[in-house]
Amino acid sequence: MSKVRDIILWVIVGILIGLAFTGYVLTITSNNMCEEECEDMNALAHKMIPSGNWFSLDDTCMCIFKDKIKAFELKEVD
């Protein structure tokens, strides 16, 4: 019985580590996409606002200019 419990525990831990890694990678990807878009528009700075959806790149990107702020939702490339 102890081996079955250990196997179930390691499977759950593996799934949680996989979910955390996926969320981390998507956050980095989303931030890089936002930075590239803002650099293309010659913005002074950028800020990425997470949507809370871990499995999609649909965060809000905010580009900060000298006289205005532009915000838009990032889209996944199909």
Image: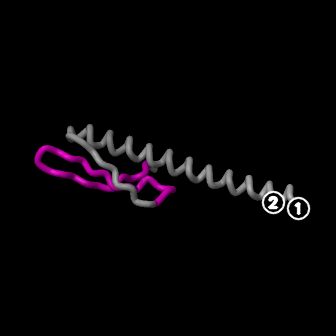
Residue 34, above or below 52: above
Q: Are marks 1 and 2 in contact (CB under 8 Å)?
A: yes
Magenta-highlighted residues? 53-77
Residue 69 shown in magenta: yes
- Most common SS among magenta residues: loop
State the scheme by which the image is colored.
one colour
Residue 75 placed where, x, y %? 39, 53
Q: Answer few, some or many: residues within 10 Å of disc 2's Cα (few below 14, many 20 plus, some between 14 and 19).
A: few
Image disc number at residue 1: 1
Image disc number at residue 11: none
Q: Answer few, some or many: residues within 10 Å of disc 1's Cα (few below 14, many 20 plus, some between 14 and 19).
A: few
Left or right placement of residue 74 versus residue 16 in this view: left
> Which kind of residue does numbered mark 2 sit on?
Arg
Picture quadrant of residue 29? top left
Secondary structure of residue under mark 1: loop
Left or right placement of residue 22 versus residue 61 in this view: right
Marks 1 and 2, how far apart at CA: 6 Å
Residue 41 placed where, x, y %? 22, 41
x 20%, y 40%: residue: 44
Residue 10 placed where, x, y %? 74, 52
Image quarter hosting the N terminus: bottom right
Residue lying furthest left: 67
Picture quadrant of residue 42? top left
x 56%, y 47%: residue: 21
Secondary structure of residue under mark 2: helix
Left or right placement of residue 20 versus residue 7 in this view: left
Residue 14 placed where, x, y %? 68, 51
Residue lying furthest front: 2
> Which kind of residue does numbered mark 1 sit on?
Met
For the image shown, how many numbered marks are present on the structure? 2
Could you say which is closer to the camera, residue 52 or residue 13? 13
Image disc number at residue 5: 2
